[in-house]
Amino acid sequence: MNDSPNPYRDLPSVDRLLADPRVSALAADRGHAAVAVVAREVLEGYRAAIAAAGALPHVTVVDAVLKRAETLRPSLRRVVNATGVIIHTNLGRAPLSRSAIEAIERVSTGYSNLEFDLDAGERGTRFSHLETTLCRITGAEAGIAVNNNASALLLSLAALCRDREVIISRGQLVEIGGGFRIPDVLRQSGATLVEVGTTNRTYASDYAEAITERTAAILRVHSSNFRVVGFTEQPSLSGLASLARERGLLLLDDLGSGAVLDTRAYGLAPEPLVQDSVRAGADVVLFSGDKLLGGPQAGIAAGRAKAIESMRRHPLARAVRIDKASIAALTATLDHYAKGDAEHEVPVWRMIALPFAAIEARAGRWADGCGAHAAVETCESTVGGGSLPGEALTSAACVITPPSGAETFAAALRAADPPIVARIHEDRVWLDPRTVDPSEDAHVLATLNGLLKASGDGR
Ligand SMILES: *Cc1c(COP(=O)(O)O)cnc(C)c1O
């Protein structure tokens, strides 16, 4: 082909490409028009390559079309999380409960009363749907939900503290993740940061001494993703609440994770509970929808009616507003706590609550199906999502020692459909059933089997 006098003439037409049996099978699956676009893009690439090199590239055009057609597959896909990290931010944080998914479907298939008061027949508010349940669970007077907790924090500071001072302990000037830093958020909101105390010790008196006529609020940020141990001191939230009340200030509490169930019941360290912060007297309690709450991405603010109302009315509220699908899923998630079935119905809590013996039995079944290169080992699952640092749940894993090497084997698992994401530790591949839905067991087992057979490993 390279010595053709006119290499352009060797290029097939789009029609001829689409008539190729492999390409036409693909077109039947992915859509004729979409595959035709891909074929044109490939031919365009060939023409450019010929223009640059004066000859046809060596890859056949059909193979190039099939390869490029992989881009027609949705990029965002379901994956199997075999890492044992329950709230895995890179893997989409919290899986939703069945009723949360059904709620999304109900309000997204047709129209809904999102901002319509059916009794009055006039405009309503999108926040009304979740407020009653949110208040019932947390004990707060009022509440709203926005896009995520970062925006809830930004909105609370902008609405309640703009052009005024906010006092925060130096031990709480943290980076949450992805470069999200508390001092930066404060600056963005138009509030002025006043740091008090030291990294390890801050006293109530430090806060008291920093109060001026410009002070609007005290902000407490839960150090959710790290732990300060040893010679440490932070005043209690109720102590800060008394101080704020005496001096006419607001107390904002950014909990991050927002647990409603007590983690101690599952052998974990205590994670502050939303209802405890409300009871202790915080004016606004902020937390994520998709961390320990186990719902959709959202930022929730629960607290005093006046403060919440100011947030609701602020122009930024529109920029960070939550959509109807998330409201539906969030309300359904909150309902599980109201009904008392969260431990069984909310996947995050179901995974936290899984008994070791059940996990070990599944890991055993996976290993049994894999032959000589697999074993069951005790390991640790983490809650993840920037909560409960250093805390782990005892778990069991199916551990593969692939002769092909751990990296190669893990990459092959990721190439499965749906992809399986495992952990590599000491040059072995660890698969923890805790974070794998039992309905995915057959796929995991078949994939492991297929890969080990293909490489002749352990059979
Ligand atoms: C995770 C976290 C946030 C950010 O929440 P997103 O919902 O991810 O925006 C804010 N503050 C704290 C303390 C957190 O742990």
Image (tube, rainbow, N blue to C red):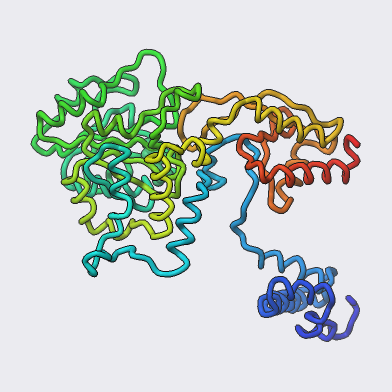
Q: Is residue 238 visible?
A: yes
Relative vertical location of residue 204 with respect to residue 416 in this rendering, above or below: above
Quarter of the figure with residue 225: top left
Q: x%, y% of residue 301?
A: 29, 44
Name the residue: 21% across, 66% down: 120
Quarter of the figure with residue 448: top right
Q: x%, y% of residue 286?
A: 31, 40
Q: Residue furthest top?
A: 231
* In the foreground, 120 or 143: 120
Name the residue: 28% across, 28% down: 169
Q: Quadrant of the N terminus?
A: bottom right
Relative vertical location of residue 324 with respect to residue 376 in this rendering, above or below: below
Q: Is residue 181 visible?
A: no
Q: Quadrant of the C terminus?
A: top right
Quarter of the figure with residue 59: bottom right
Q: x%, y% of residue 139?
A: 26, 37
* In the foreground, 296 or 319: 296
* In the foreground, 351 or 410: 351
Name the residue: 26% across, 60% down: 125
Q: Quadrant of ligand 1?
A: top left
Picture mark count: 0
Name the residue: 79% across, 73% down: 25
Relative vertical location of residue 207 with respect to residue 72 in this rendering, above or below: above
Q: x%, y% of residue 132?
A: 28, 47
Relative vertical location of residue 154 with respect to residue 7 in this rendering, above or below: above
